[in-house]
Image (cartoon, rainbow, N blue to C red):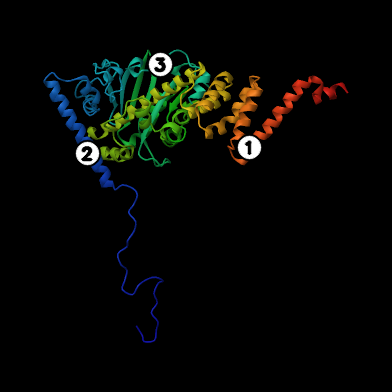
Amino acid sequence: MPDGMSVLRRTGVRPGGRGARIGRPSPLPRMNDLRARIAEIIARDRARHTRVHAADADGRFSATARSSLLATAAWPKATRQAAGEGEAEPYGGSTGGLGANARRGLPHRAAPASAASASAHGLAFQIREQRIALDDLGLEVVGRGACDALLLAHLGLKGDAPRDWTDILFLDTETTGLAGGTGTYVFLIGLAHIANGELVLRQHLLRDISAESEFVEHLKRELEPYRACASYNGKTFDIPLLRTRFVMAIRSELTVDESHLDLLHPARRLWKDRFGSTTLRQLEDSILDDGRVADIPGSCIPDAYFHYLRRGDEAIIAPVITHNARDVISLVRIADRVAGAVLDARTGNAPAHAPAAFALARVFERTGELEAAFGCYESAYYDGDNELRVRLALPYARALERRGERDRAVQMLETLLALGLGSVRWREQVESRLRRLARRKAMKKAGPRADPAFANATA
């Protein structure tokens, strides 16, 4: 470099050169870690499968072992049968202990081969069907009798109410990612409906991404007969993604979402304040008392599918299929529990948890069921804490006014004011309501001539 010329450097660069870059570790799990977890799940399932078959050979294949066995045994054999290598193996009841008999340690009623089987459409996609009796699922409302439009409103219905439970399709999807958009594929969808006292679950697996158009065309024929669908957060994730795939693959519209029951929102109303989380796994533990023992994490499912596409090993995808089946069946059972809570509240048995009773009261008001709303308001007010009483005081006062119990409404509002509860804005609203109630009471005592409208009419 010629003498006298200055040396130019970028700001912050040291003369000694660029050192090792130190950064924060990525919050996302490494791909190798995800593959290791998937490999661990597969190895555990294969070991369990080996033990069960060894017990079966000795005549000791118990109902408990059968209910805990994942789909790794039935799925590969069904796949071989679809390619012409043997008879189909019945696939009924292996849903992780969901049947009532399995929970009691009794033999689970396996579905006949004609009712529970697997079939393949070439090598493009595969269909697996199983049937489970409604009694085995413990259902008391769902699938029993005709649909009640007001009851479906409590289940999150948007759109026209279906006529019967058989018109509702319960669905859950497994996808190649959680971001959505045109680059995310639906590779597995579980569809369940009520028929002849049974829950019929059909799972559709896309085995070749290049055959998505054929797969989506088949799904369109499966969805068309149903007037409504039910999902868990499907209005935000599953349905928009399905609509995107329908447009991208076959240039068609999705019609089943014209009436949609998204059970995430009623579940939140009833149980979020109680359990904090309202994921399906949390509700299985807390509400259904049927937690999952062996289950693939949702974050591992996309990588498991890509690994399955590369290797072609059916044991890799089997835990994903079982995970999807559990999601759909839990969706049906959660719908039944929400419906049962609504019917109990109508008969005067409001939920014991005060925030849940308050949430139900607000929905009852929207559906015009004022007596049920009043019962829930009253239960929530007496069982709740002061913070909840402040939140429900004004709607509860309106409910009391409708019943002609203005004195009770005034006494309740004055008590809350005397305790110094609520924000400044809330206290202003309560004082305004009290003044209005006082005027109405004075007008009622003075008779119709005190009414300004009466005075103007007779002037």
Under mark 1, the amino acid is Arg
Under mark 3, the amino acid is Glu
Q: Which residue is mark 2?
A: 40
Q: Which residue is mark 1?
A: 427
Crowd rating for badge 3 (residues with CA inside 10 Å; few <14, some 14–19, many 20+): some
Q: Which residue is mark 3?
A: 140
Under mark 2, the amino acid is Glu
x then y, percent, for residue 63 = 22, 19
Q: Secondary structure at mark 1?
A: helix
Say which residue appears at 42% left-offset and 22% top-offset. Answer: 337
Confirm or deny contact between disc 3 and disc 1 (CB under 8 A): no
Say which residue appears at 23% left-offset and 43% top-offset. Answer: 36
Out of 23 and 435, give the one closest to the viewer.
435
Sequence order check, earlier mark of 3 and 1? 3
> Residue 182 occupies which quadrant of the picture?
top left
Q: Is residue 372 visible?
A: yes
